[in-house]
Amino acid sequence: MDFVTQSLVIGITENAPLVLAAIGFALLYRLSGLINVAYSETITLGAYFGMWINTTYGLDFYAVLIPTGLLAGALSVGTYLAIFRPAKHRNVGVLEMIIISFGLSIFLRHGLQFIFGYPERFYDVPPPDTIWVLGVGVTSFRLLAVVSVALLSLLLYLFIQRSTYGLKIRALASDENLAQVSGIRPLAVTVLIWFIAGVAGGLAGAFYGVGSSVSPLLGWRQFLLILMVTLVGGSWGLGGVILVGVGTSVALAAMALQFEQVLYAQLVLIVAFVVVLKWRGTRLTEAAKV
Amino acid sequence: MTLDWLDAFLITGLFEVAMVIGLALLLHLQLGLARIANFGVVGFWAIGMYVFGVLYVKVDWPFGDPWQFLVCAGAGTLVAGLAGLLVGWLIADLDTDGVLVGTLGFAAAVQILATTEDELTGGAFGLGGLGFPFDIGKVKENEFLWLVITTAFVAAILVYAWRVHRSPYGRLLIAMGGNEPLARSLGKSTFRTKLWLFGVTSAAMGLLGAMDGVMVRFLDVGHIGVDVTLAAIVGLVLGGTARVWGAVVGVILTVGLFDIVVRSYLPLPQEWYTQTIPVLREAVFGAVLIVVLLFRPLGILGDMRRDRLMRQIHGR
């Protein structure tokens, strides 16, 4: 019973940012069908933005979250307007789009080192309080991450499924031409989606960063898991992404406890996800888009 | 043989260029002809390198070099080829997104195993004890001979790719890349073709990895990062994914520029070479990918000759 409790608490609190990042990534994927590899750098830069605001202006971590989210959202929109929109207008193919996003990811990951420096960076925050949840010690930052992720996930879910804008987003994802005929402005809705996705990725990065350290590979290390959670969970909509994300987080913690080595847990998950993809074939990735 | 006129950095730079040209040529067969985006090139390269390295260092062979090298490199090639067959089978019926997951996942799995199985691989501390399968004198002379041998192997890959272009197998790869369901409807076994393609190209990537292991003589997990895949992709995309010579031209212009011209001939402050230049190299490579695919998606050399010919015949 202890093992189950520990896996649940550690999994959900340690990996809450994974769920948040996967939601943002899935939104983009559902809208455009694009595997945006550069999303990993939205996460990384979110961590860097937060650290920079925190250490430069002396704001505490909670106050840092709003400007961090806004900056990451603006960055995400900037990449769409500067690169992905022109690429779409030039009828660049799906495969080439992925390679472009890969190039952008590499460019941002290395370019940011000229701005923020090469060494690993840290948030300047007081040691977090330890709160006991079901007998497992959890830091206050981790707990805040869980609450934030739960709140943001709920808000995003309601926004996409219940609001007028959400309806427009889903309409645009299904059929852009039909949506346009119905009076939906694709550019405004698309920019909104890229912004929301950027905010989600940036906040995930800030939560990852404050829990450990900030380095250029922070987002890239999470990308494969985010991608797999989205491809597998996305076929059941945003709710599926959240469920698979939470399941992945708990499985990761359980296996890390079992193997005493988090890399083995990641290895098992990679194999499991690839087997699921193989088993479900092309239907899965197609279904995850709409 | 005296090689005093030859700079040691130039030898390693040329070796790096030859190595990446080899990988880019193999990627050309996958991406340029069959339109299979292998983002896990480094995984196949690394598995060959590590299988070779572990067998070479950890096994007490009853014979010495060059047989020891040949057996260990053969095993590395075989394992990389089998891994290629496995990954090929996994991704054969997946679309581009699934291929991305499968190949990236494989590369991540290899890196994880190289890190965690530290009793075999040395993990983060690395694995030393590798050497050249011959000794003709000083280190520089051995390195130069190894560069010549590697270049010969890369030239063989170039000839193979050139012949594939002109063979029924190559035409099937191109047909598969253009419209796989159509190729299948014409009775072609696209599944078997993909398996063969992945098996052969991955095996060759594994052998290149083993050859790189000999040159660096020390394996560490920092050496098997995404930058290997990036170098092959950016070279191929810049030169032209559809042309055999695209890989050669593109890699010379990218890896050659940084690893030979900048490293050996530009009078830059020495401290720049530790972090600034490597970071700048990767950032420029990323930017090149974006700019080329936005403004000249077919790369410097452009389309395949047969496509040009078809356009001329049909007046388009």
Image: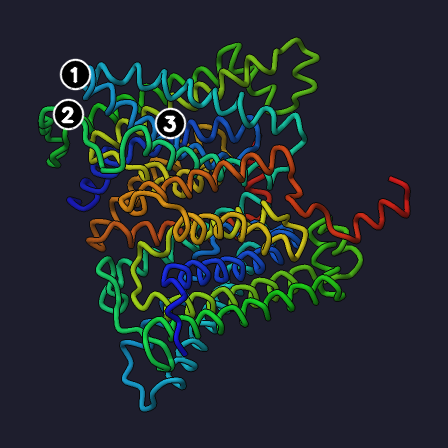
Looking at the image, is B237 positioned above or below residue B6? above
- Report which residue position mark 1 lands on: A58
Within 10 Å of disc 3 (Cα), the crowding (few <14, some 14-19, many 20+) is many
Q: Are marks 2 and 1 in contact (CB under 8 Å)?
A: yes
- Report which residue position mark 2 lands on: A124
User: Residue A222 at x, y = what percent?
Assistant: 35, 40
- Report which residue position mark 3 lands on: A201
Depth check, mark 3 against mark 1: the one in front is: 1
Kindly state the secondary structure of the residue where label 2 is placed.
loop
Please identify the quarter of the rendering in which residue A154 is found: top left
Which tag, 3 or 2, sits closer to the chain's start?
2
Which tag, 2 or 1, sits closer to the chain's start?
1
Q: Residue at x 31, y 86 (%)?
A: B61
Left or right: B104 in relation to B191: left
Left or right: B103 in relation to A93: left
How many dots with numbers?
3
Please identify the quarter of the rendering in which residue A229 is found: top left
Q: Residue at x 58, y 59 (%)?
A: B25
